Amino acid sequence: MPMKPLSGLFLALACVLGIAATGCVFELAYGDPDLGVNPTRWILGFSLPATLGSLLVAIRLNKPA
């Protein structure tokens, strides 16, 4: 089954947000984040649920009717 374009866009967004969350975890784990602790925590706090949400939207948009 081919992927719908909007579903692909949400899947790409989930990938980018997942990479951002992973980077934030490593930045916080190793001590001194480049952006500072609070902005890195904010990015992590936003990107984790947004990753899950955009992945679920991509899956639901691509389901057959």
Image (cartoon, helix red, strand yellow):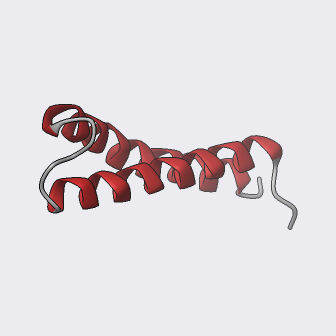
> Relative to 41, does residue 59 appear above or below in the rendering?
below
Horizontal side, residue 54 vs residue 52: left or right? right
Q: Residue at x 73, y 50 (%)?
A: 8
The x, y position of residue 57, in whole percent, is 56, 46
Q: How many marks?
A: 0
Q: Looking at the image, which residue sits at the far bottom? A: 1
Give the camera-side residue of 64 and 42: 42
Q: Residue at x 12, y 55 (%)?
A: 31
Give the camera-side residue of 16 and 51: 16
Horizontal side, residue 44 vs residue 50: left or right? left
Give the camera-side residue of 62 and 24: 24
Q: Quadrant of the N terminus?
A: bottom right
Q: Residue at x 36, y 52 (%)?
A: 21
Q: Residue at x 81, y 57 (%)?
A: 3
The x, y position of residue 56, in whole percent, is 51, 52
Horizontal side, residue 22 vs residue 39: left or right? right
> Relative to 26, does residue 54 appear above or below in the rendering?
above
